[in-house]
Amino acid sequence: MQNTTLPDTALAIIIGVVSGIITAAIIWSLAQVVKKNVIPWYRKMIYKGFDVSGTWVQPIDDRHTQTGEFILKQRAEQLEGTCRPERLPRQRKV
């Protein structure tokens, strides 16, 4: 009587583990695509509020000697941006 079940069992375990790892990688990749692309696209499509994306310039002080340039990027309810303060040159009286 010949015992051939051990190599067959080991091969089945190896194939099962490798296919499980590949399946997990595929599921993780699809989840990342949905999380980073599909959900933001959908949220942008159903968003009903104002879009304030762009560059905004606003005086920062009362004397209007300094302004702030706000560069905003909006994705549905998420808003991010930067502000660059800029000192204006003094105006000379002639």
Image (cartoon, rainbow, N blue to C red):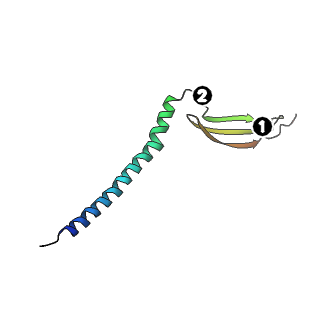
Q: Is residue 47 left or right of residue 22?
A: right
Identify residue type, mark 2.
Answer: Phe
In the image, residue 14 sits, relative to residue 49, either above or below, namely below
Q: Which amino acid does label 1 sit on?
A: Ile
Tell me: 14 left or right of 61.
left
Q: Which mark is residue 74?
A: none
**Residue 42 x, y percent position in the rendering:** 47, 34
The quarter of the rendered structure image containing the C terminus is: top right
In the image, 19: left or right of 68? left
Secondary structure beneath disc 2? loop
The location of residue 51, given as percent across then percent down, is: 59, 30
Q: What element carries label 1?
A: loop
> What residue do we see at 55% from left, 34% from top?
76
Mark number displayed over residue 60: 1
Work out whether residue 54 or residue 24 is closer to the camera in this orientation and state it.
Answer: 24
Query: Which residue is at a point 47% across and 36% down the rendered structure image?
Result: 41
Residue that protrudes farthest toward the left in the picture:
1
Residue holding disc 2 = 50
Residue neighbourhood size for the residue with mark 2, other residues' Cα within 10 Å, grouped as few (<14), some (14–19), many (≥20): few
Percent position of residue 27, x then y: 38, 49
User: At which x and y percent is residue 11?
Assistant: 24, 65
Give whichever of discs 1 and 2 has the lower sequence position.
2
Question: In which quadrant of the rendered view does residue 86 lie?
Answer: top right
